[in-house]
Image: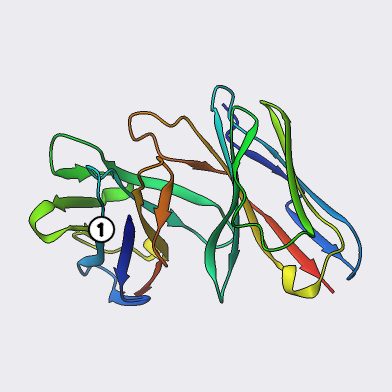
Amino acid sequence: AQSVTQLGSHVSVSEGALVLLRCNYSSSVPPYLFWYVQYPNQGLQLLLKYTTGATLVKGINGFEAEFKKSETSFHLTKPSAHMSDAAEYFCAVRDNTDKLIFGTGTRLQVFP
Amino acid sequence: DAGVIQSPRHEVTEMGQEVTLRCKPISGHDYLFWYRQTMMRGLELLIYFNNNVPIDDSGMPEDRFSAKMPNASFSTLKIQPSEPRDSAVYFCASSIMTGGYGYTFGSGTRLTVV
């Protein structure tokens, strides 16, 4: 069965610091992996996705993620955090019925 | 495209009343999902439809919850009777299920049952 584990329910960084949000997956089919962001009082918005091809994928707002099959990971990074990045981030993997399985989310706080 | 449209954005109702949440998916999307989000339980998939047909309703918490999709452009989630523990944000999402498309979410309906 497919599953996603997000390490750390809360991550705090200073403005300008590196953002690293961790996601590990389990999948019995070639994984399609996604990161979503949820700003307060809004729905989830697709940040980026990996389906096939290049393992380093770039998304909106300067975020990127690298698919590492050997580590079953798909960590999300951003070189320099901005106050506007404060939000909740969800990792997701496609399951074998093509539904998305979401992780429990990581809340990112950015301090000035 | 206006995206996935949900109404109302906020709903406050008294315990025991019927509540109906509405969703208009993106045109051409053949999958529609209803999710519930709470602090305690996170994001839960309640039910999903493919081509207007319910495929999996195993996430529907109890018989008080029902969902319909009478046509490709409209779906409802009904709670009758509502209870305080139903208070949550309810999201609708739609997708085409090929090529790793992902889901497009609506802005949600914040339901408060008092």
Q: Residues within 10 Å of mark 1 (few under 14, many from 20)?
A: some
Above or below B84: residue A45: above
User: Measured from the top left, where is residue A75 in percent x and y?
Assistant: 21, 60
Q: Residue at x 72, y 62 (%)?
A: B62
Residue that badge 1 annotates: A26
Q: Chain of mark 1?
A: A
User: Measured from the top left, where is residue A24 in percent x and y?
Assistant: 24, 63
Split into 4 quadrants, where in the image is the N terminus of chain B?
top right
User: Measured from the top left, where is residue A52 in percent x and y?
Assistant: 19, 35
Amino acid type at mark 1: Ser
The answer to whether residue B107 is seen in the rendering is no
Numbered marks: total: 1
Determine whether the residue tagged by mark 1 lies in a helix, strand or loop.
Answer: strand
Split into 4 quadrants, where in the image is the C terminus of chain B?
bottom right
Above or below A13: residue B53: above
Q: Residue at x 73, y 69 (%)?
A: B87
Viewer-proximal residue among A40 and B64 = B64
- Colouring chosen for the image of the structure: rainbow
Taking the view exactly as shown, the residue that stands out farthest to the left is: A70
User: Measured from the top left, where is residue A78 in percent x and y?
Assistant: 23, 58
The answer to whether residue A96 is seen in the rendering is yes
Viewer-proximal residue among B57 and A58 = B57
Q: Residue at x 43, y 44 (%)?
A: A99
Above or below B19: residue A47: above
- Left or right: A56 as drawn, with respect to A11: left
Q: Quadrant of residue A111?
A: bottom left
Q: Quadrant of residue B88?
A: bottom right
